[in-house]
Amino acid sequence: MASCQSSCINLQSFFILIFSSISTFFLVSNHNNIVVAIANSKPPPFTALYMPIKKDNSTLQYYTTIEWGSEENYFDVVIDLGGELWSLPCDSKNKSTTYRSINCGSTKCRLAKRSSCSSTNTSTGSNCRANDSTCTVSFHNPFNESVLSGRLSEDAFAAVPSDGDRISRDSYVNTSRLLPFLCLDSSSLKGLARGFMETNYGIPAGMIGFGATEMSFAQNLAPAFEVPSKFAICLPAAEAGQGVIFVGGGPYWFDPFWENGTKDASKWLDYTPLFINPFGEYFIGVKSIKIDKRVVDFDTSLLSLNKKTGAGGTKISTSTPYTVLHTSIYKAVVDDFVKSAAVRNITRVVVMGPFGACFSTKNVRWSKAGPRVPVIDLELEGSTTATCSRVTWRIDGANSVVRINKNVMCLGFIDGGSKAKTSIVIGGLQLEDNLLEFDLKTSRLGFTSSFLPRDTSCSTERLLQPDD
């Protein structure tokens, strides 16, 4: 559970926003059920925009379903937390009359990093219509470590309003402000989870970037729907669960737990400064690592981020399934974890998979927070607006170990090598069932640590708002 809770609270406030829209359809995934409704001309009062999150067990990637364009196009896209752009395959069944390609010389083309011009009259798909002087952009695909190139385009996006608890029965399209994305061939998206929606079933999903860059989805969605420049993400821990992204801020309601008379998780947040590297990726200031309250001994200079080169520091990422550590940090963490596990009478066994330390489950007891293994604490720099100089991100058993089978579990951390550019990359396992709020305006990260000790999770069911 996050420390210094009472003194490190930032109260969120409601706001009401009404804007006109056009009629359309929307699709919301509610666990395994699909609900379709017809939009009204005006949205209800809301505090944020809602997006569901699902986990693909075959790739350990997290994806959301989006609606875009003029023809009720629904598409599964893999979430890249630090991604620069939003990209979609061109060779799908989608068509849109609001689609536009972005030309060279335009402001948006200049804002996109690594852009160039392409002259072609060949169309490669019904999504993206190429034309002369189309702006071409190259970018890094973190899921297969390749460099991709696509045509910069833009189209309308449909958002689902939420009050933090219930979600609207209708989605709303802002056709006056189109969102930029990259048009790619699906063959270039190898390594991504395959889509489940009819329009991209069986082909690799696109990617949706939430990085702090001019062209990312997060940076363009908030102003398009006139909500604050912040988003919160809560990853599900299982394929059957459903997490959530809120764009625009709290409240964030999670059932059934109530604390201090509220189930609003924005009241549970501790805060730490948020740093951005030159590529728009999100970093935090880890000061030390503790295992069962004992400080792990390693070269702490590795924890410093070089803001010019992006080297060192601690990055938060959804593109890696497990936390990756610089070799010197990894060895120290594994050694201390193994020693603490032995004190708990937990027996080490032969390693399996990519992991460096595995254990028998024979003597392990279980709690709400998962297996009772040594507790890992990340000691973070406190927010400048808080009274705490340090805050703690706690990693309990559900977020620290991977269950291989009924007899074996492994420490879910990976050796990134002695030449790792980033010293710590906090991966998906360690983020699951944790609420993270990225405030891009104040450069601050809010975090809760695991929801599980609070008798809730990221997979809280969201109800549809009642009809008027």
Image (spheres, rainbow, N blue to C red):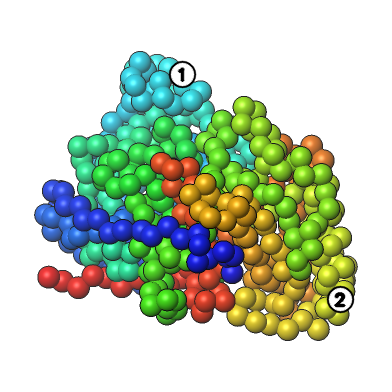
Q: Secondary structure at mark 1?
A: strand
Residue 446: x and y in percent read 49, 55
Eye-nearest disc, 2 or 1: 2
The residue that appears at 56% across and 30% down in the rendered structure is 278
The residue that appears at 44% across and 26% down in the rendered structure is 112
Residue contact between numbered discs 2 and 1, judged by CB atoms under 8 Å = no
Q: Quadrant of residue 453?
A: bottom right
Residue toward you, 27 or 277: 277
Q: Left or right? Give the position of 357 relative to 33.
A: right
Q: In the rendered picture of this protein, how many numbered marks are placed on residues? A: 2
Can residue 197 be seen here? The reply is no
The residue that appears at 58% across and 59% down in the rendered structure is 431
Can residue 326 be seen here? The reply is yes
Q: Quadrant of residue 310?
A: top right
Residue type of the residue flagged with mark 2:
Val
Q: Which mark is residue 343?
A: 2
Residue toward you, 244 or 130: 244
Is 29 rendered above or below residue 390?
A: below
The residue that appears at 55% across and 33% down in the rendered structure is 279
Residue 164: x and y in percent read 33, 64
Q: Which mark is residue 116?
A: 1
Q: CA distance from mark 2 to mark 1?
A: 59 Å
Quadrant in the picture for the N terminus: bottom right
